[in-house]
Image (spheres, rainbow, N blue to C red):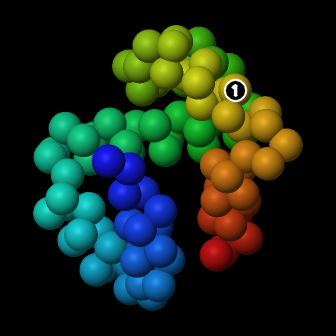
């Protein structure tokens, strides 16, 4: 059962970061929050040019997870890159 399209539509309509944070903390376990946070941090580091090995060392993650993030960032239509660019632009 893939409900990501529905969840994405609901979250796209929310303009309250505090509400979104509460939502994630209520629906995810503390470990899931840490996992998502570390994956977000790894793609930001990679986008800034930090090597995969250094990113793995800093975050204590496997190279497999780092490689996945790197591969996604290299795609022409990378959603990760678009979202990270939004941070850089203040969005």
Q: Is residue 72 left or right of residue 35?
A: right
Towards the viewer: 64 or 53: 64
- State which quadrant residue 6 falls in: bottom left
Q: Badge 1, how many Cα within 10 Å: few under 14, some, many 20+? A: few
Residue at x 72%, y 57% (from the top left corner): 82
Residue of label 1: 71
Q: On the rendered image, what quadrant is the C terminus found in?
A: bottom right
Q: Tally the marks.
A: 1
Towards the viewer: 70 or 48: 70
Residue at x 85%, y 43% (from the top left corner): 76
Residue 19 in picture, x, y percent from top left: 28, 80
Residue 80 in picture, x, y percent from top left: 64, 49
Q: Is residue 29 above or below residue 87?
A: above
Q: Is residue 39 above or below residue 18?
A: above
Residue 35 visible, this angle: yes
Q: Is residue 91 above or below residue 85?
A: below
Residue 56 visible, this angle: no
Residue 34 in picture, x, y percent from top left: 28, 41
- State which quadrant residue 44 falls in: top right
Q: Residue furthest front?
A: 1
Q: Is residue 88 left or right of residue 64?
A: right
Residue at x 32%, y 48% (from the top left corner): 1
Q: Residue furthest right?
A: 76
Helix, strand or loop at label 1? It is: helix
Towards the viewer: 58 or 23: 23
Q: Is residue 50 left or right of residue 58?
A: right
Residue at x 47%, y 62% (from the top left corner): 5
């Amino acid at each position: 059962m893939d409900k990501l399209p529905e969840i994405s539509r609901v979250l796209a309509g929310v303009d309250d970061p505090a509400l979104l944070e509460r939502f994630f903390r209520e629906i995810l376990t503390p470990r899931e929050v840490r996992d998502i946070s570390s994956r977000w941090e790894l793609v930001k580091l990679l986008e800034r040019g930090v090597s995969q090995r250094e990113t793995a060392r800093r975050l204590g993650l496997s190279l497999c997870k780092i490689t996945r993030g790197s591969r996604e960032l290299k795609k022409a239509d990378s959603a990760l890159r678009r979202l990270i660019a939004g941070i850089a632009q203040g969005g």
